[in-house]
Amino acid sequence: MRTGEELPPLEIPITRTLIVAGAIASRDYQDVHHDAELARQKGSPDIFMNILTTNGLVGRYITDHFGPGAVLRKVAIRLGAPNYPGDTMVLTGAVETVEDGTATVRVVGENGIGRHVSGTVTVTLPVREAADARDARDARDARDARDARDARDARDARDARDVADAGDAGGAS
Amino acid sequence: MRLKAYEGRPAAVGGVGKDPVNEPMIRHWCEAMGDTDPAYEGPDAVAPPTMLQAWTMGGLSGHTGRSAAYDELLGLLDTAGYTSVVATDCEQEYLRPLRPGDEITFDSVIESVSERKTTKLGTGYFVTTRTDVRVGGGEPAGTHRFRILKYAPARRRPKSPRARRPRPVVNRDNAGFWEGVGRRRLLIQRCGDCGTLRFPWLPGCGACGSPEWDTVEASGEGSVYSYVVMHHPRFEAFDPPYAVGLIELAEGVRIVSNVVGVPYDKVRIGLPVRLEFARFDNDGDDGDEGGEDGQDGELVLPVFRVQEGGGN
Ligand SMILES: [Zn+2]
């Protein structure tokens, strides 16, 4: 895993059930998250997802991607266009930094009317991921060493050939 | 409103989670989120870190530990017409995993209250709180910074272009009044003989009968003398329910007008109001500045805005 690496997108259908289930699971009983009639009276076209659900989904997107053992350290999000029923939100992410087994990932969630969420997640990578990152570095180092060795070998071979050529030439003289 | 004074004051003191961290709530959360991370199930389960705020929620039985300062601040904003609320930012840091059985306590502080901002949703104020969540009253488990927008919803106006407000009938007797409105001045007639003020405009003095008059400009201060809320009949140019106020001006005369700045059901007799001029039907609802202008395209009317802090 490297800086700039993009996470595969995650599509989340915004159903009425998801909005209500998320609101209740987060103990948020504000009527705009479950009562369409009251939501309309408050100027919203329909019920909409609460911020705690968005927060939970962003966290899930990151831990799903990095797999078991990934641990969330920080989640900071800002909301924009609301998630209304019938829409689809597509979460995308890009790795911003990786250091000492901890990554920061920039996350964006777009829906049909705009950018629902943008934010940054700090996550401690599972041992395997951290090991992979280390392996990738080791492999790169090994490749670099091999390339250097190959170059040296090639040079030696050329030198040897040059010597041999010189010898042949000498022999022909 | 003296909103900045609330910065630094507690929003919740000694809050206690309604339930200790527990497996059923964790499972319900994971089901809702579609989260199948094995860390959140089994004998060594931890709670999803993003549940941090959920453990502090009051639910249907209300918040614990909520401070008078926070209720006061929200009440002040409600009274001023900023009755709607939407969460805009959430920043959480997780310091320690939460496990079933952990007892949650929390304290919150009002970090900041913004200047008045105009957003797509409406005009309002951003209020930021920071909550420190602890386990067993001691060990920090995480911090949670939360920003809400407390706003007056912008009215949606789905009316057709044909449905415009009725135009005033301007005649010799009231032309001076409408000229004044055009210059953003509310003019009151004054009798040239006995000095009695009168409104609406009439050709003669009701006190002495004199046809002589001049004008004084209203200061703009007033209060709601009476009001009525219109629900029916429906007229395309208006968006019921709305409040029609009879405003008593500081000068003593009364004028029928709209009361703005609070929801229709918050208008009360005695509310202090101040004059402002509103533009209607300027054919620019969708940013289209083309077409007619002047007195045909645009209508300017005096309306009365409830003053901040009014109605306390
Ligand atoms: Zn008179």
Image (cartoon, rainbow, N blue to C red):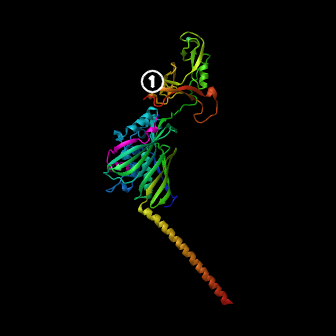
Q: Is residue B276 above or below residue B120?
A: above
B164 or B223, which lies in front?
A: B223
Q: Position of residue B223 (x, y in %)?
A: 48, 24
The answer to whether the residue bearing label 1 lies less than 8 angstroms from the nearest atom of ligand 1 is no
Which quarter of the frame holds ligand 1?
top right
What kind of element bears circle 1?
loop
- The residue segment tinted magenta is B2-31
B128 or B302, which lies in front?
A: B128
Residue furthest right as drawn: A173
- The quadrant of the image that shows the C terminus of chain A is bottom right
Residue A15 visible in image:
no
Task: Identify the residue position indicated by label 1 in the image.
Answer: B270
Verify whether residue A138 appears in magenta.
no
Quarter of the view holding residue B18: top left
Q: Is residue A134 above or below residue B191?
A: below
Q: Amino acid at mark 1?
A: Gly
B231 or B121, which lies in front?
A: B121
Residue A166 visible in image:
yes
Q: Position of residue B157 (x, y in %)?
A: 53, 32
Verify whether residue B23 appears in magenta.
yes
Residue B284 appears left or right of A3: right
Q: Chain of mark 1?
A: B
Residue B234 appears left or right of A171: left
Q: Position of residue A79 (x, y in %)?
A: 48, 45
Residue A107 appears left or right of A165: left
Q: Residues within 10 Å of mark 1 (few under 14, many from 20)?
A: some
